[in-house]
Amino acid sequence: MTDREKSVVAGRRPGERACPRCGAVFVCGNEAGAQSCWCAELPPALPIPGAGSGCYCPACLREIIAQQDQAGRKS
Ligand SMILES: [Zn+2]
């Protein structure tokens, strides 16, 4: 890693992270110091398998919840 790359990493905003599904960069409200995260307003989704930390970006989280909805409606 070059010095320039290090400074880019260090300059990240608090709570900023990359989505494990699509790689999009988004900000987790909880980690950024907000009272709550935008994800708290969405229905709970499955935790990321094996990730241990983090959450999906808003777009992926909505897609995953929609897919779970559809799967749940099949009877
Ligand atoms: Zn994503």
Image (cartoon, rainbow, N blue to C red):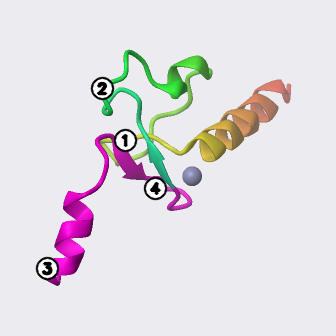
Picture quarter with the N terminus: bottom left
**The disc label shown at residue 74, or none:** none
Do the CB atoms of the residues marked 1 and 4 lie less than 8 Å apart? yes
Label 4 lies in ligand 1 vicinity (Cβ under 8 Å):
yes
Q: Which residue is mark 3?
A: 3
Query: Any mark on residue 54, and which?
Result: 1
Amino acid at circle 1 = Gly
- Residue 71 placed where, x, y %? 77, 34
Does residue 71 belong to the magenta stretch?
A: no
Mark 1 or mark 3, whichever is nearer to me: 3
**Image spot of residue 67 (x, y percent):** 74, 39
Determine which residue is flagged by label 2.
33
Tell me if residue 42 comes above or below residue 5 in the rendering: above
Residue that badge 4 annotates:
20
In the rendered structure, which disc, 2 or 3, sits on the residue that comes first in sequence? 3
Horizontal and vertical percent position of residue 68 = 70, 34
Pointers 1 and 3 in contact (C-beta within 8 Å)? no
